[in-house]
Amino acid sequence: MAANIVATVYIHIALAVGTAYSFFIFKKQEVIHCFIIWSLITATAFLSGQIWALVFILAMGALYLLRNQRQQILPYYFMALPVLPLNIFYRIPSPFPGTNELLTFNYYRLISLFIITPIFLRFISHCYFSKFFNSKKIRLIDSPVDLLVLLYSFLMYILCFRDFPSLTAAIKNIIYISLMIPFPYYVISRYVLSFKHFIKIFLAVTCTAVFLSFIVLLETVIDWDFYNILHQYLGIEASRFVFLKLYRSGFLRIEGTMGQPIAFGYFMVLNIGILLFLKKLLIIKNIPGYATLILFITALFLTGSRGPWLCCIVMILLFWGLPKINLNIIGIYLFSGILAIGGILAVGKNFFISLDPYGTFSYRIALIQNSLMEIQKNLWFGSADYFSSVELEEMRQGQGIIDIVNSYLQVALHSGVIGLFLFALIFIILIFQIFKCVKRISRKNSPECFYLGILMVGTLIASMLLIGTVSLLPYIKLYCWSFIALGSAYVRFIHAAEKEAVVDCRI
């Protein structure tokens, strides 16, 4: 039997088990909808052998949702988000002379193009043409985070003209950046308007995590990465990560559709935080909640990625500890924590090196030192060809690659301290905005909104910690910006509720 058919059967077995389990936990009809989305997209991708069949299915599904399920489209968007890998891509041939390709798209760019972009254009029409539609005007810049996201996106746009040799290449990459950062940010931050919307999105994300957990556990049992063959049957290109089969301590390091074990680990960390939140509000009962927590922690452990393990511990400590401390002096706690971590790393450097049989800690120290020398050469706006520098050439590994295992260094090398400042400030400002909202909420009167704020802070801090240990892989970048948008939506939701003199967090 052909490998693509066998992979499809295995994936559907895991999906069936995951659907039964999720329906037992949530008892929501959306679980069945999630199964249908995953089954339809997976079967089309593995069995059709045609990329355009997948494009047609996604376009028709998006059109149906936009016409009939507009109020529920974001939960469906999050259901469809991790169905297929992002590290396989298709180049559309260009009909114009002098250019090789029209556009390059992957699975997420299709999802964003068909679902997010129409809603974003509608949002822009309400910003600038509200009088013609007899609707309430929506402001484009409503908070400091909005401004920072726009400035960071605009900087990325400007740098495209530096990074790419032709005008058409720069414009294409501006489109890709728009589909990844500003479009989803504005859609999620503006169209999540109630506590019920947050819950629906979290249930959608958690349901996909259950599906992926059963898929990767089955991959571990039979020692086969199902998605590794997908690019062959779609007749499209794949990044180098598709061909890697990573092991640690004799176990296959699972990655599901995320392209890298550490990206899958980050996804599970986010879901462990969501699960703690849902369990705290008794949306999930105790026994199913603990069983699901064990499932997620098992999947996280099998990634073999120590960065997500650390972030999981931080997430649990934050969710458990933040409600118990004085939030009025939270800045002192955070600053003390940063100093403590920095001091431990500085003092115990030799100890950590002795515990690291793979040499990753030594590599990270050398990477920071060499990257700082390169950053000083192009301090303000970075460089497009930093990989060719002498300093980073020393970091080339046996596989012939230079792995920038620190997103902050990656941003600084590409866009300088200006880009790094804007990127980091988005997280910092948003975290303190959420803290201000949480401090004004009564935990007794509005425990749902209180713990939702705690969850948002936990996911953002865990994200900041995680991206300091890995480069900005596609799914990490995608969920990172999604939760930034959800954090911004939470701030808008609380402010709107306070103007009405009531914080309504009913489900």
Image (tube, rainbow, N blue to C red):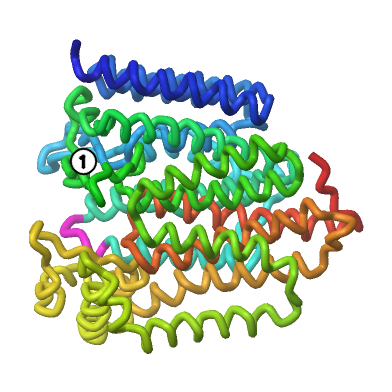
Residue in view at x 89 percent, y 56 percent = 445
Q: Is residue 341 visible?
A: yes
Residue toward you, 385 or 94: 385
Q: Amino acid at mark 1?
A: Val
Q: Does the stretch in magenta take in 164?
A: yes
Instruction: Please state if 9 lies on the left or on the right of 126 as rendered.
Output: left
Q: Which image quarter holds the C terminus? A: top right
Quarter of the image holding residue 7? Answer: top left
Q: Is residue 437 visible?
A: no
**Image height of 68 relative to 446, above or below:** above
> x, y percentage for residue 324?
75, 69
Extent of the magenta region: 161-166
Residue toward you, 268 or 195: 268
> x, y percentage for residue 340?
50, 84
Residue identified by numbered label 1:
242
Residue toward you, 207 or 216: 216
Instruction: Please state if 482 lies on the left or on the right of 353 as rendered.
Output: right
Rate crowding at label 1 as few (under 14), some (14 to 19) or many (20 or more) other CA atoms within 10 Å: some
Residue in view at x 32 percent, y 31 percent = 221
Quarter of the image holding residue 119? Answer: top right
Instruction: Please state if 177 lies on the left or on the right of 437 as rendered.
Output: left
Residue in view at x 43 percent, y 48 percent = 300
Residue toward you, 48 or 59: 48
> x, y percentage for residue 385?
16, 69
> x, y percentage for residue 151?
47, 67
